[in-house]
Image (tube, rainbow, N blue to C red):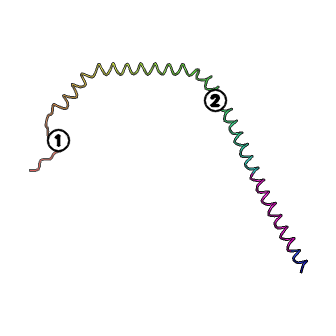
């Protein structure tokens, strides 16, 4: 009987050691996955920074300095606004007269599609 209980005890101990080893292996796997993920993120960030730097260099080479473009755009915008304002002031009076005459001068007419039923 004691040999059976010793055998059972040994089996229980072996099962406990196996569970402990399994849990330890899961923890190591989790740590390895976490470490691999961190390394991958670091590598991605490094690659992204490198590509952004290359892009900025190419953009500067192709387009020139951004200051010149901004100044040109600002100048063109100001010129366009001035042209629109001068056109507005020049044509405002005549357009108001046309608009008021169209609204106020009403000529009542029968619509051509109206059918007379007699």
Residue 71 in the figure: left or right of residue 14: left
Q: Is residue 117 left or right of residue 59?
A: left
Residue 16, how many percent across, how many down?
Answer: 81, 66
Residue at image coords 87%, 70%: 10
- Local crowd at mark 2 within 10 Å, few (<14), some, or many (≥20)? few
Residue extending furthest toward the front: 2
Q: Residue most toward the left?
A: 118
Q: Any mark on residue 111, and which?
A: 1
Q: Which mark is residue 5?
A: none
- How far across and down, in percent of the image, does residue 6 sit? 89, 74
Residue 10 lies left or right of residue 99; in this view the side is right
Residue 22 in the magenta stretch? The answer is: yes
Q: Is residue 95 magenta?
A: no
Q: Is residue 39 above or below residue 8?
A: above
The residue carrying pointer 1 sits among few (fewer than 14), some (14 to 19) or many (20 or more) residues within 10 Å by Cα, namely: few
Quadrant of the rendering where the N terminus is positioned: bottom right
Q: What residue lies at 30% left-to-right and 20% top-to-bottom?
A: 89
What is the x, y in percent for residue 35? 74, 46
Q: Which residue is mark 2?
A: 55
Closer to us: 73 or 101: 73
Residue sitting at the far bottom = 1
Q: Nearer the viewer, residue 33 or 19?
A: 19
Span shown in magenta: 8-30
- Give the mark nearest the N terminus, 1 or 2: 2
Q: Is residue 78 above or below residue 3?
A: above
* Cα distance between the residues tagged 1 and 2: 66 Å
Helix, strand or loop status at disc 1: loop
Q: Main secondary structure of the magenta part?
A: helix
């Amino acid at each position: 009987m004691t040999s059976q209980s010793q055998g059972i005890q040994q089996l229980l101990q072996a099962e406990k050691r196996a569970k402990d080893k399994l849990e330890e292996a899961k923890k190591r796997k989790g740590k390895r996955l976490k470490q691999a993920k961190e390394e991958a993120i670091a590598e991605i960030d490094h690659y992204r920074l490198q590509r952004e730097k290359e892009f900025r260099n190419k953009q500067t080479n192709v387009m020139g300095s951004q200051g010149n473009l901004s100044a040109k755009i600002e100048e063109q915008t100001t010129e366009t606004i001035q042209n629109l304002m001068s056109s507005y002031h020049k044509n405002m009076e005549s357009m108001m007269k046309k608009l008021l005459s169209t609204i106020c001068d009403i000529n009542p007419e029968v619509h051509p599609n109206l059918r007379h039923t007699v």
